[in-house]
Image (spheres, rainbow, N blue to C red):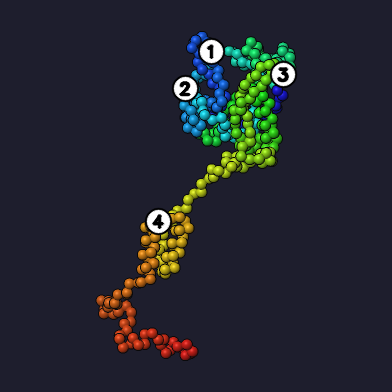
Amino acid sequence: MGSRIRTAQKQARELGRLRTGYSIPSDDPKKRARPVKSTTWVLSSHAEHYVAAAAEAWGGEVERWQPQGNGAPQFRVITKAEQLDAILPPGDPLSQANEMWNKGGCARRCDGETEQISRHPCLCLAEHGPEWHLLRQDLRTKDKVCAPTSRLNVVLPDMPDVGVWRVETHSFYAANELAGTVDMVLSGTGGKGLVPVALRIEPRTRVAGGKTKHFPVVVVEIRGVTTRQALTGPLPTAVALDPTGARGVAAIEAPRPDYLALAEGALTVDDVQDVYRKANAAGHLNDDLVAALKAKAEELKNPAPAPDPEPDEDGAYPAEVVDEQDTEQAGTWPAVAQAGSGA
């Protein structure tokens, strides 16, 4: 595995881990727990509500979990999801090294050329030759060579809180594929912006030396955008969060107009019809509103007769009263107001 140069960068808080396997306690307390490969994602965290949210989103049951060694108790869920929607955060989210661990911690950490702790040339290469990584397939020599270790930080957009989840794999094949995908994306984005991806657990088969081996590989693939879009610069945050646009951000609903007040102020039937059309276009019509608008329209069509004027306290009328003998002239214009009269 070739070396990848890393630059200093800000790190988001780690919320939990994404795993491709789990362990089953041994019946013999003197023996270590038995590892089991999982076809679905396993999420673990110190925070129970993170794991509970994952169980709600992807299925499974929340359970207490004790990591091997002296790690603090955690919570985990074996989900039913073979694929998770995720986002690559800004910067370089992938770190890789060939590592060997024992009870005392990390004994070796090598970039493929130099062992970083002792500062000596690659010890596995010197001790076992260029095919040293194949020794890990044999349980008798597995603990004598380093494991290709890839750690990928991703954001799970549907989980609570702001931070990253770490995917860790010791697969030789995943190491090369992850590096190729991430490096290609970084070459296009410059490590700026968010990139939507899908995380899959892909079953693989390899035949070598007359033996068939089945193993899972973590696969990272671009999600919801084309390769051209992913490599031509940082994506807008809204696109990265919802690349397909399927969810859509709901628009803030405008306040519902007071249609009854608008109808009450109508002076003509046409005004009432305008209120009706406005309510219908907005999808706000209901039986009660239709009945109220119809009643208002009928009121305007057949207005109630005006009451007879009554004199005030001084005996004066608010308007001139026309008696019966003047009704003949009521429908005609006064002479001084005739057109062409010069008035």
- The image shows residue 306 at horizontal and vertical percentages of 32, 74
User: Which residue is located at x 49 percent, y 30 percent?
Assistant: 59
Residue linked to disc 4: 286
Query: Is residue 75 in view from this perspective?
Result: yes
Please identify, in this view, whether the residue under mark 4 or under mark 2 is nearer the observer.
4
* Mark 4 vs mark 3, CA separation in Å: 77 Å
Q: Are marks 4 and 3 in contact (CB under 8 Å)?
A: no
User: Which residue is located at x 46 percent, y 23 percent?
Assistant: 63
Type of amino acid at the residue the image marks with label 3: Thr
- Judge whether 39 appears above or below 337 on screen: above
* Mark 3 vs mark 2, CA separation in Å: 39 Å
Q: Are marks 2 and 1 in contact (CB under 8 Å)?
A: no
User: Which residue is located at x 47 percent, y 32 percent?
Assistant: 56
Report how many numbered discs are placed on residues in the image. Answer: 4
Residue linked to disc 1: 32
Q: Are marks 3 and 2 in contact (CB under 8 Å)?
A: no
Q: Are marks 1 and 4 in contact (CB under 8 Å)?
A: no
Residue linked to disc 3: 114
> Closer to the camera, 316 or 206?
206
Q: Which mark is residue 64?
A: 2
Label 2 SS: strand
Label 3 SS: strand
Residue 83 occupies which quadrant of the picture? Answer: top right
Type of amino acid at the residue the image marks with label 2: Arg
Query: Is residue 151 in view from this perspective?
Result: no
At label 3, counting other C-alpha atoms closer than 10 Å, the crowd grade (few under 14, some 14-19, many 20 or more) is some
Label 1 SS: loop
